Image (cartoon, rainbow, N blue to C red):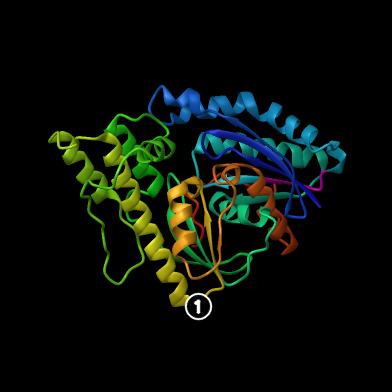
Amino acid sequence: MKILGIETSCDETAAAVIEDGVKILSNEIASQVEIHARYGGIVPEVASRQHTLSIIPIIAAAITKAGLDFSEIDAIAVTYGPGLAGSLLTGVNAAKALALGRGLPLIGVNHLEGHMYANWLTGQTPQFPLICLIVSGGHSDIVLVRGHGDYTLLGRTRDDAAGEAFDKAARLLGLGYPGGPVVEKAALQGKDTVPLPKTRIKDSYDFSFSGIKTALLRLVEEKKIDNVNDAAASFQNTIVETLVSKTIAVALEHGVKQILVAGGVAANKALRKALTGQSPLPVSIPPMSLCTDNAAMIAACAYYKYRQGYKSDLSLDVVPGLKLTQ
């Protein structure tokens, strides 16, 4: 079964064709990073306008790269939330038009659920039950996954998500945008010598990263940062230690078979190294290209949803604040 996936939740216009939920036939992405870098962050209206320019060419490229004709596509999958409303609308409307015009099933996919399914594109099949750490610009969640579509949220961020914290730290340190990659690059040249707090929430696996961000702000304001690279290394290590320790603790408590990591922050090499090195359980992390927003993960997720009998109709609407679990 070949599914065309469409992803436009934020600032990446993406389309991909996935076969049977595991084989990537194509995975095309039109990035807007350079456009938004001049503003130091994503401008929603700019993002949505850029999506309207890119959506048709990127879908056509995905079909061509897959070596297929549109008549060989079996279903259309699309992200309908969470994300920026204007961006989501572009993808959802394009998907609905294609589904209607071609008479194909339409499958709406939760963006966070899609991130998890990037792990099904690695060549290895994850084993249930498992714990998935979803870390991105807007989310830091620990999810117990008992089976396809069977999720329980065990921990979440109470304020800033990990990716958001990296963006703010990069801005404070004058490193640029996007925050994750530039902080990681600076950290390679620095040492963990700047004292930063680790927030511990009693009897909870929730995260809180606003405290470390505020602590860094105070150090910058008081001119106590002697070396930007050292500050970046300390900030990154503190975030990574918090994510890793809580994820492993949750996994051991619930007796799962393995740990998955998903989302843009999963591309961070320090996080990948720390979790794989410290976890007593097998760890699956997608390749860098499948950590950031892409349509391959959306199509992969849609395959398993469709097998369970899930389909959307043409009344499908965007849900910017969509939750993974209700």
> Is 76 in the magenta?
yes
Is residue 147 visible in this depiction of the protein? yes
Task: Give the residues in magenta.
Answer: 73-77
Point 60% across, 45% down: residue: 290
Above or below, 216 relative to 143: above
Above or below, 272 relative to 70: below
Point 63% across, 26% down: residue: 54
Specify whether 26 is left or right of 322.
right
Q: Position of residue 208 (x, y in %)?
A: 30, 55
Badge 1 amino acid = Gly
Specify whether 34 is left or right of 75.
left
Above or below, 308 relative to 122: below
Specify whether 326 is left or right of 240.
right
Q: Position of residue 252 (x, y in %)?
A: 45, 74
SS state under label 1: loop
Is residue 315 visible in this depiction of the protein? no
Q: How many neighbours does mark 1 have within 10 angstroms: few (below 14), some (14-19), or many (20 or more)?
A: few
The secondary structure that most of the magenta stretch takes on is: strand
- Number of numbered discs: 1
Residue 49, image quadrant: top right
Q: Position of residue 114 (x, y in %)?
A: 60, 52
> Is 308 in the magenta?
no
Residue under label 1, please give it.
Answer: 255
Q: Residue furthest left?
A: 222
Q: Position of residue 139 (x, y in %)?
A: 43, 51
Residue 289, image quadrant: top right
Point 74% across, 30% down: residue: 61
